[in-house]
Image (cartoon, rainbow, N blue to C red):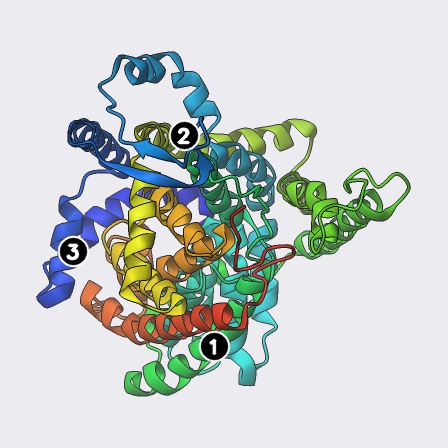
Amino acid sequence: MTPTDVSDSLTTMKKTVTGSTQNGFLGFVERSGNRLPDPVFIFVFLIGILVLISQLCAWAGVSAAHPTNLAEDGSGPLILTAKSLFSAENIQKVWVEMPKTFTHFHPLGYVLVVMLGAGVAERSGLFSSGIKSAMRHAPKGLLTPTVALVAMLSNHAADAGYVVVIPLAAIIFAAAGRHPLAGIAAGFAGVSGGFSANFTPGQLDALLFGITEAAVEGAELGTGWTMNIAGNWYFIAVLLLVYLPVIWYVTDKVIEPPLGKWIPGEMHKEAFGQEDKPLAEGEKRGLRRAGGAVLGVCCLWLVMAFGPGTPLLNDGPGTEGQAWYVTATPFFKSLVGGFMILFLAAGWAYGSAAGTIKSSDDLVAMMSESMKDMGYYLVLSFAAAHFVVMFNWSNLGLISAVHGAGAIKSSGLPLPIVLGLIVLFASVLNLFVGSASAKWALLAPVLVPMLILLGVSPEGATAAYRVGDSATNIISPLMVYFPLVLIFARRWQADFGIGSLTAMMIPYSVWMLGTGVALMILWIVLGINLGPGAPIGIELP
């Protein structure tokens, strides 16, 4: 099965698998989630509710003092009042600014640009061959951590992480005399539970920080903050190093022992499909060329950053204490385009050697196919963009943030505990709404400005959300790839059910959520930067 096959068969598999009825809390999650409409219609319903609430709040005179802006006469802080979305002004905005609202939705451009390159790298076979090469040469004694590491790094490869890593992990475990279900568990935990952990920023960073940027601009707090795709770089790299021993320990000490010794039967020969095929000479040559292309793009970026004229660096000293960051702002903003060129060059170099790209027509076709795959995301973005902008027009986002920040301050809860609770809240919400972008589009307009008022940077708010969003992916039957993983497991154990998979993944979820919360709390206590030029704290002017 290739990544492009997934979209055609996933819906059918999900309907088949999620028909099971579970008991207890998992049953409640499954039944409740199955009743939820598509995320697109969730946003449509929420817009309707928002319109009604805005009218009620306008009638009730709901208001809050702006934390930074003064009234026009300078007599005191600017008073924000709830605005009705039924007003003639806002109704006019909805219709007149509809194209602008959609096309100016920040995540849209970032994600589409990155996916132009990532789509070529995926369809040329680069991601699949790279993952296979890394896992096939793993030392047996380090099999589990190698699988976990490759699984987390494969998140840059979109579908390939699920479609290649997880079934291949089972085969490699079986070939080493270990239980293949333990391999599936380790691969699933890395790909999905460690969704936000990686050594470098990627597509997810572009997506989430685009939504964060929209939330910051909508709040109009005058922070001077600019979007930096590398804003969580240090944090996600450390998160990977934290999750690696966690997955290793849980797999080898908690999950595999109860599974017992693996005894392959005649029927399991069928489970060794295309995933275990050795790399062809063209594929090996393609990987070498792709490595050279990656090196070349990195060198090009370094020349543009530090060479003559330094086009990716600003002139001038910048502000005190952040001179280097202000100077490097164009470089950080260029990373979105940089990743597109990186993936495109590596995918083209691989495909030309492996025979998957024979002409420029093939290259353009792959880029076009990647845009076709983004069709659903475009529809979701249209609905999400209107929800976010209408939330800003109503002033309810900032008013809620001001009152929420005041309530937290009066409660006396330490800020690290507040961030920890936000992580837990995101993890619970993740059980019911699977889309990372949909959840963050719902939460960011309130959480980002609220945390800014409490002294937490937009990067800190995004990092807290990411930890909670990924840790419970692996125990939610509503996660889009959950049925696919179940199908992989049934290739090795025919009676393996949705409850079996959930129960197997719960220890990973508990450990990853616990260590993620602890890391988030420790990070804010120590006050370490989350990325280059991205402090966890922020001061309002």
Residue 530 image-quadrant placement = bottom right
SS for tag 3? Answer: helix
Q: What is the crowding at mark 1: few (fewer than 14 residues within 10 Å), some, or many (at least 20)?
A: few
Tell me where residue 67 appears, x and y as whole percent: 42, 43
Relative to residue 45, is residue 290 depicted above or below?
below
Relative to residue 350, is residue 366 depicted above or below?
above
Q: How far apart are marks 1 and 2 (CA)?
A: 42 Å
> What residue type is disc 1 on?
Ala
> What residue type is disc 2 on?
Leu
> Which residue occupies 33% across, 70% down?
509
The reply, left or right, for residue 136 in relation to residue 443 is: right
Q: Closer to the observer: label 1 or label 2?
A: 2
**Residues tagged 3 and 2 counted as in contact (Cβ below 8 A):** no
> Which badge, 1 or 2, is on the more N-terminal residue?
1
> Which residue occupies 11% across, 63% down?
22
Relative to residue 68, is residue 101 depicted above or below?
above
Residue 30's mark? 3
SS for tag 1? Answer: helix
> What residue type is disc 3 on?
Glu
> Which badge, 3 or 1, is on the more N-terminal residue?
3
The residue at which mark 1 appears reads as 175
Q: What is the crowding at mark 3: few (fewer than 14 residues within 10 Å), some, or many (at least 20)?
A: many
Query: Is residue 344 or residue 398 the one in the foreground?
Result: 398
Tell me where residue 324 appears, x and y as whole percent: 74, 52
> Which badge, 3 or 2, is on the more N-terminal residue?
3
Residue 263 visible? The answer is no
Tell me where residue 474 appears, x and y as whole percent: 32, 63
The reply, left or right, for residue 384 in relation to residue 274 is: left
Q: Distance between the residues labelled 3 and 1?
A: 35 Å
The residue at which mark 2 appears reads as 378
> Which residue occupies 53% across, 51% down?
157
Residue 186 image-quadrant placement = bottom left
